[in-house]
Amino acid sequence: MRLVTVVCLLVLVVGVVCYCGCAPKPVAPPTAGAPAPAGAALGESICKTGIGASGQHLAFTGGSDRFKQEPGGCLGCHAEDGRGRTLPKGKIPAINYTALRGGAKPLYASDDAVVATVRGGTNSLGRVLSSMMPRWTLTDPEGGALVEYLKVLDQAPPAAKPAGEPAKPAAKAAPSKG
């Protein structure tokens, strides 16, 4: 009976990770004594690996506990280009700068509001984000660098869709008159 319970729990954990579709990628440990990146380079480090200005992973303050054991960056879930992804059971939203701050009615009124969401897990409307979304401790320079990198993501070409992610249906061609 005990073995069955352990196997069921293991299957459940693997299922949750597969369902989320955003298992963090392994990260090489930071090089001791390496100079800390700054600006968009620091933002890239945070976004891709979760490693901040200290050369260590950002402090985890809430959200899914799996990020305590396997820290990673934003792009592990939100796609390499920050444009989000569609999964069979839901959508992970885009986090590139235009998605957050662009358009006639931006989701966030300021860059500080974007950083506050990463820190506290509540969006600009006061809604608590998904429990899967981690909350991180960011210094003000790290928050600014993260926003700068989100702007860089706007310039990147869209990433190829991972296997298993549904492609958008192609537009139907108009019937030819013949």
Image: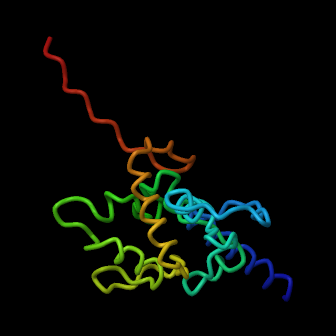
Horizontal and vertical percent for residue 89? 46, 65
User: Toward the viewer: 108 or 53?
Assistant: 53
- Please give the name of the residue rendered at 44% of the width and 64% of the height, measured from the top-left corner: 92
Q: Quadrant of the C terminus?
A: top left
Q: State the scheme by which the image is colored.
A: rainbow
Q: Is residue 12 above or below residue 106?
A: below
Horizontal and vertical percent for residue 14? 69, 70
Numbered label tally: 0
Residue lying furthest top in this view?
A: 178
Q: Is residue 124 above or below residue 1?
A: above
User: Toward the viewer: 121 or 91?
Assistant: 121
User: Toward the viewer: 86 or 105?
Assistant: 105
User: Toward the viewer: 146 or 78?
Assistant: 146
- Please give the name of the residue rendered at 19% of the width and 26% of the height, measured from the top-left corner: 174
- Please give the name of the residue rendered at 80% of the width and 82% of the height, measured from the top-left corner: 6
Horizontal and vertical percent for residue 161? 50, 45
Horizontal and vertical percent for residue 58? 62, 76
Q: Is residue 156 left or right of residue 15?
A: left
Q: Quadrant of the N terminus?
A: bottom right
- Please give the name of the residue rendered at 38% of the width and 50% of the height, measured from the top-left corner: 154
Q: Is residue 12 left or right of residue 106?
A: right
Q: Is residue 4 above or below residue 84?
A: below
